[in-house]
Image (spheres, rainbow, N blue to C red):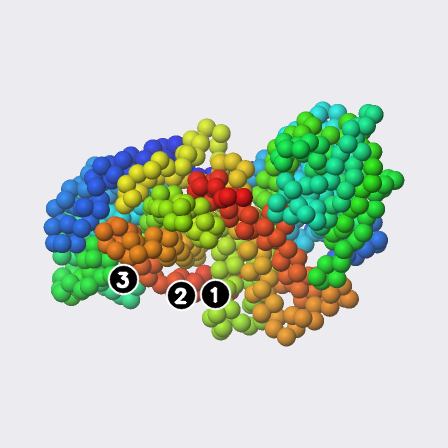
Amino acid sequence: MRPAGTMNLDLDDETHAFRAEVRSWLATNVPATPLPPVDTPEGDLAHRAWERQLATAGLSVVSWPTAYGGRDVSPLQWLIFEEEYHRARAPVRINQNGLFLLAPTLFAHGTAEQRARLLPRMARADDVWAQAWSEPEAGSDLAGIRSRAVRTDGGWLLSGQKTWSTRAAQADRAFGLFRTGVDRHRGLTYLMFDLRVEGVTVRPIQQVGGATGFAEIFLDQVFVPDADVLGAVDQGWTVAMSTASHERGLSLRSPGRFTAAAGRLVRLWCRAGAHADPALSDRVVDGWVAARAYQLHSYGTATREATDRPPEPPPPPGRADRPTRTGPTMLSGGGHATSMTKVFWSELDVALHEVALDLLGPDAETGGLRTGTAGWAGDDGGTDAWLDGYLFSLAGPIYAGTNEIQRTVIAERVLGLPRDRR
Amino acid sequence: MRLTPSAEQEQFAAALHAMLTEADIPTVARRWAADDPAPGQVVWRRLAELGVAGLAVPERWGGLAAHPADVVIACEELGHHALPGPVAESIAALPMLLTTLGDDALCETWLPRLASGEVIGTLAVAPHVPYATDADVVSLVLRADERTLRLGVPGPRLRSVDDTRRLVEVADGALLVTGPTVGPAVAHALDAGALACAAQLLGAGHALLETTLRYAGQRTQFGQPIGQFQAVKHLLADVAIGLEFARPLLYAAAVALADHPAMAARDISAAKVACADAAQRAARTALQVHGAIGYARESGLDLWLTRIWALARTWGTQSWHRDRIRTALAAGDLT
């Protein structure tokens, strides 16, 4: 019998059973060949159907409360679900903007009416959501938003331009920040709006690999009812930052994604007979170790008990040659510390895929972007998947706040260094 | 599942931190290097009173039989303060070696005295730990290879980049044990020592981050604290990320040692690789951000810098540890 508080990596019976259930369901239901690309008309339909299938099985939004279609599982069980999902190579979540960005914000800031109206439809992908953060003049400097929301009878009229809006070309609805006042941060309001109404023009943008994963949105006097304001008017920055923290943190790119990729990388390396090449082998090892570090770090955060001592504040100034003590972990603290996670996983993702392409050698470029699926289903990834995954990974250090912005946030908000002159 | 320290472990680490802060370890370390080990031996006795020396010693030999995570947490704090002396050897490797060998006479002779602090011990195991650290100032010196365990006879002292590490060549002394039990016991001792070494590296890396953050907040150039420049901020953010994501590997390796022995070699190597890389990044950045003053001994940074440079290459090199992980992965040990 182990004393309470002893470190261990054992799963309790309930979590074991949950993992087994998820694994078994995915083994039966994940398509044997990949669905058509999500940004094509066939792919859009197929991925929506997949979401409905997941929802019917009660596996679409396992961490949500049961009232909205979830199963109210623990944070650890959510990590386990993600491990199984990525291990099974299940389809990309077409509604991930809704599930991982908007839903946490609705839980934190939405009204009961909004949650009841929006979440069940989101869970079944009846509404697919796009994010509409960036604008041509508001990228890393997100508070530079110019799109306006002007008061009208019973709601607001939206005008302006959004860009790099993931899924906007096919989504039903979108969420973003709009200028409602003059103050840079306290003059923004968080609004949800329809993409398929009069006044909205969506122009898909072809990405570096040829896909159209994001789009521009042009808005001309688009009506939004008051019911679709999320949080208070002019308080959108604060509301959005809670979403941004989710995007940066582990909910958008959970460790399971990377432990699964690292496992496939190891199998690819074994199959390629590359053991004899120490340079490649070391990179495989480092990729696997980093993926495991992210997994273990998340296990630690997810299972930290409420009674545990909160992390200590930054150390007071002391003698230059004497250590202070920063406590057991910096990350478990608040939203800003998720910037550390974001830099870590995004660089890990690029590294894993770069090694895989190097292992594939001259075959890497033949991934046959969107022209074929040969090799996809193999347990070592397959050339197509590694090449597409590489292109996707390269966006990671850019979206959700570039890694340069994140490093500045870490230095200022986590480490306590003086703020930049911005 | 649990991978964060308990309230008790936090209190234990805080108590160690308070004691070591009070003990003024930088001064103790300078005297240790200058052939005056007495103040350091006083600190080691205080550590024994707090239970650190007996953490890895079974209860029947006077120890606490603590979880490996307790050893890791203690060693991290000792590394945080750059405590001089054979930390990995006396606190982790020797108790593991003697316990695993299971020779009751040897255990009875040495383990109670290690646990009580009466004896500090050190060890040489070629090729990973070729010299016995501090063998000229401690009272138990062992020398092991795959087949034999002997007392070690201290010979000439060698230079170490970290002059608080008193590296000593040891010659064969009296034969203690020979036979097939020695090899596995030595392997376990190397793993325990490597884990303790990784923990010290993480602690030392954290100390350098903390010190460098203070300096970057105080030192002004071009009319502003240098910590306000993004180039400096981003260097330090990367140090923080490296240390933050090394720690769970360290804790998981301790868990493996306790619960999943078949995975312990792989997981200890992962911890050593990550902690040594993170600590070396911390050292490089600390020196760069301090600039010339960091390169000067008067800054006091050298205690942590040189410790990290030395520890990153002992108890198994990075290549050796990566190779152990590679072997495990090639055998399919992915979870």
Label 2 and label 3 in one chain: yes
List x then y, in percent, for residue A388.
Answer: 68, 61
A369 lies left or right of B2: right
Kindly indicate the quadrant of the structure image that contains residue A380: bottom right
Q: Horizontal and vertical percent for residue A368?
A: 73, 68
Along the line of sight, which residue is nearer the eye, A158 or B174?
Answer: A158
Q: What's the distance in space between the residues labelled 1 and 2, CA to CA?
A: 8 Å
Left or right, A8 with reference to B158: right
Task: Please name the residue shown 65% across and 42% down the image.
Answer: A144
Are dots 1 and 2 on a single chain?
Answer: no
Please, what secondary structure does the residue beneath circle 1 have? helix
Residue wearing tag 1: A282
Quadrant position of residue A224: top right
Query: Label 1, label 3: how many angstroms apart (C-alpha)?
Result: 23 Å
Q: Mark 2 points at which residue?
A: B319
Where, quadrant-wise, is the C terminus of chain A in this rendering?
top right
Q: How crowded is mark 3: few (under 14 residues within 10 Å), some or many (20 or more)?
A: some
Marked residue nearer the N-terminal end (2 or 3): 3
Q: Which mark is residue B55?
A: none
Estimate the spatial distance between the alpha carbons at disc 2 and disc 3, rounded to whole Å: 15 Å
Asked if the residue under mark 2 is in contact with the one under mark 1, i.e. CB atoms within 8 Å, the reply is yes
Q: Looking at this view, is B279 or B271 the one in front?
A: B279
Q: Which chain does the residue under circle 2 lie in? A: B
Question: Amino acid type of disc 3?
Answer: Val
Asked if marks 2 and 3 touch (Cβ < 8 Å), the reply is: no
Residue A353 visible in image: yes
| Residue A128 percent location from the top left of the image | 77, 42
Three-letter residue code for mark 1: Asp
Q: Which mark is residue B129?
A: 3
- From this view, report whether residue A356 is shown above or below residue B281: below
Disc 1: which chain? A
